[in-house]
Amino acid sequence: MRIPFHQLKAEFKRILISCKFTEAKAEACARIFAENSRDGVYTHGLNRFPVFVQYVQEGLINPDAMPTLVDQMGAIERWDGNFGPGVLNAEFCMARAIELAKTNGIGCVALRNTNHWMRGGTYGWQAADAGCISISFTNTIANLPPWGGIDPRLGNNPLVIAIPREDGHVVLDMAITQYSFGKLHQYKAAGEQLPLPGGYDKAGNLTTDPAAIIESWRPLPIGFWKGSGLSLVLDLLATVLSKGDSTEKITERKKETGVSQVFICIRPDNDAQTTQLIEQILDYTKTSGTEPGKNIQYPGEGTLKTREKNLKEGIPVDEKIWQQVLAM
């Protein structure tokens, strides 16, 4: 089932206004959710929207809250999200990091007491559209055991790195687990196995069964012990720079709210040499031979293709979730 972008966005906006969002906030929030589905990240678009509304209704997300400046030191700023909508707080802070980078060459904004930013890549695309290189990351509730452990003590702490490019930005958007929990739930709902082992079942066996991994809460980190270490340092950086809550403190709430995030922007030299260097690297990467039926794509290339297709043909939706949204 496919739905036009404008219809998806309109339904989101209608519901958000009924949840006491202002017209402007409802418009911006609806746009981000709809764009996430448009770009193929359905787990953090339509599929996540009912949970977002539930958090608003439970008072975990304050529609009226705005970020407030806490500290400033040159090109580094610390903001408090005041438990406002995570997507709006993140867009605001990335815009501020862009502004700092345009002035100083680099800008860093650390944010505390915010909520889930949904698709982290949203803010990488935002920076790249503004001509900036960006690095951003967030901590999360504990959902990943440290390497050698069996109990979740780390977050899957998404990391986003974006490089602007005229013929299509390079945007890496990844969780530190081999498969995000959103992707695990997507495979489970479709009744499909994972292409590669994504974690352990309760008996400690590696498995491609998404349901077994969700039940055990033992997903694999990317790169095994390397991913475990990366998750830990991202939590350290997000917590120390924002002076906000760590994965441990977030987990104590039982629900993922009050997370800490960092947005770093760098203003590159927008000259012919920079363009040439980027193209050389991408071209060289694609000279590798491939297995039958496989192709090589840079991070973000598939997103652009999905976006074009979904705008033309409509956005694929889970009919059950779509009916749930229509009934709100």
Image (cartoon, rainbow, N blue to C red):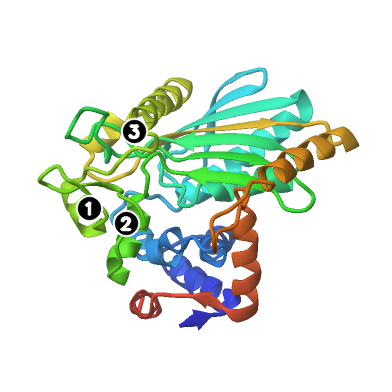
Mark closer to the chain start, 2 or 3: 2
Residue underneath mark 1: 214
Residue 36 locus on image (x, y percent):
53, 60
Residue underneath mark 2: 184
Q: Is residue 275 left or right of residue 43?
A: right
Q: Is residue 263 above or below residue 322?
A: above
Callout 2 amino acid: Leu
Mark closer to the chain start, 1 or 3: 1
Q: Is residue 301 left or right of residue 185?
A: right
Taking the spot 75% from the left edge, 25% from the top edge, the residue there is: 105
Quadrant where the C terminus is found in the figure: bottom left
Disc number at residue 41? none
**1 and 3 marks in contact (CB < 8 Å):** no
Tell us which disc is closer to us: 1 or 3: 3
Residue underneath mark 3: 224
Residue lying farthest right? 272
